[in-house]
Amino acid sequence: MNTSCFIKTDKGFPFRQMNGYYFCKELTLDVGDGILEEAFVNMNGSFEKWVLVYSYFNGVFLKNGTHAGRPVYKEARKFDRQPYPPPEDQGGSMFQAVVPAEIKYCEDIKAWVLTHKNIGKSEDDDYDSSCNWLLRSPETDSFNVLDASGKWDMWVGVLGTTDVSITCNRCADRSDCNLNGECSDDGRCICNNGNGVNYFGEHCEVKLRDECKTIIPEDGNYTMSIEHISSWSNSNEVAANEGSDSNYVVWDDIWQEYSRPVFSSIDNDERWSLIYSGSRWFGMNLTGTNVASKQWRTAVSNYHAFWYRAYENTTTFVSDPNANHYQ
């Protein structure tokens, strides 16, 4: 009878494992600051060469099905860590629709990979293959991608390496929230706000002090301040632009991208914003945008530095790599 009991338990474990019962549901990826000068981007059958800064893909990935008996993780929005809508539902944006990257296991090379169905190393890549990798882990049989943190191969035109950090966005107690928030019953960090400081990030690791909510650039005689989403429109403007849609009226959150606050300046009808994009701060000239419009809100909620070609299109200055958690 004891043997039978053990056999039943042993059969049950892989069944639950194969169905994702034990897998992390949401994780955060950090791949460093490597650059691929000529990434081949498949745009509906024709190829373009874009600059790919790998840190553009830093951030939250959400479990989205399984492959090879292991979870598949799909890139989430940088704005609110929610799933990107299908490209056809991003039509209100002024930029290229975002197609999220994926982390999955490749059986052929026995490795975890960062892959994208529209981005490859050459035109000859198999863009439909789960092994069309941009980053790959060392060889492993592990079912848990968290075991794969460490040195990965990175394609930068030749084979390079980078340090990859993968953490599960689940807390057990306040220490997992860096003592800057509370761990909820469902295992999520609820970050503290007040007493002169705001905290951001899945583990409340980013700190914004009140005295840093307004900054003065080294060049220029202007200031930049954090921007609240609720300042983009009032009920009359939303009613005029979108009928009964009033979702943005009730929001009173600090505008964030990549778990960092956005700083903006409006001077003489010019709009400048300082936006974190995975590892660097981008100073962007956004003059002429209508922050009361649906087009603006669709653009910022789906912001992705790669797909928006932020460096080429709107950026006028860029910081050095900066992973500082203090603002």
Image (cartoon, rainbow, N blue to C red):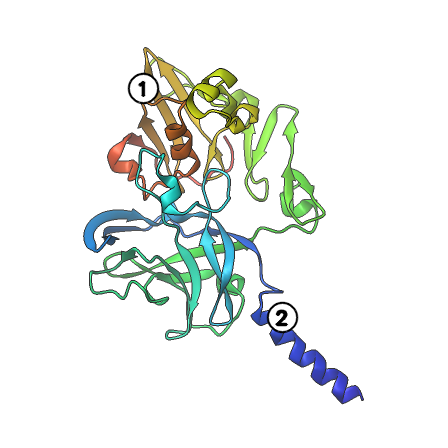
Q: Which mark is residue 57?
A: none
* Residue that mark 1 sits on: 219
Q: What residue type is labelled 1?
A: Asp
- Give the quarter of the figure containing the N terminus: bottom right
Question: Neighbour class for label 2 at 10 Å: few (<14), some, many (≥20)?
Answer: few
Give the left or right position of residue 174, taking residue 94 as reference. Answer: right
Residue 173 in picture, x, y percent from top left: 70, 48
Give the amino acid at mark 2: Arg
Which residue occupies 31% across, 33% down?
94
Tell me what residue is drawn at x 75 percent, y 87 percent.
4
Q: In which quarter of the image is residue 198?
A: top right
Task: State the residue position of label 2.
Answer: 16
Q: In which quarter of the image is residue 300?
A: top left
Structural crowding at the residue carrying mark 1, measured as other residues with C-alpha within 10 Å and reported as few (<14), some (14–19) or many (≥20): few
Residue 29 in picture, x, y percent from top left: 47, 52
Residue placed at 21% from the left, 60% from the top?
A: 122
In the picture as drawn, the residue positioned furthest to the top comes out as 268
Whether residue 279 is visible: no
Kindly check if marks 1 and 2 are in contact, taking CB atoms under 8 A apart as contact: no
- First in sequence: mark 1 or mark 2? 2
In the orientation shown, which residue stands out farthest toward the right? 1
Of discs 1 and 2, which sits in the foreground?
2
Give the camera-side residue of 110 and 165: 110
Q: Where 79 sits versus 267, above or below?
A: below
Q: Which secondary structure, mark 2?
A: helix
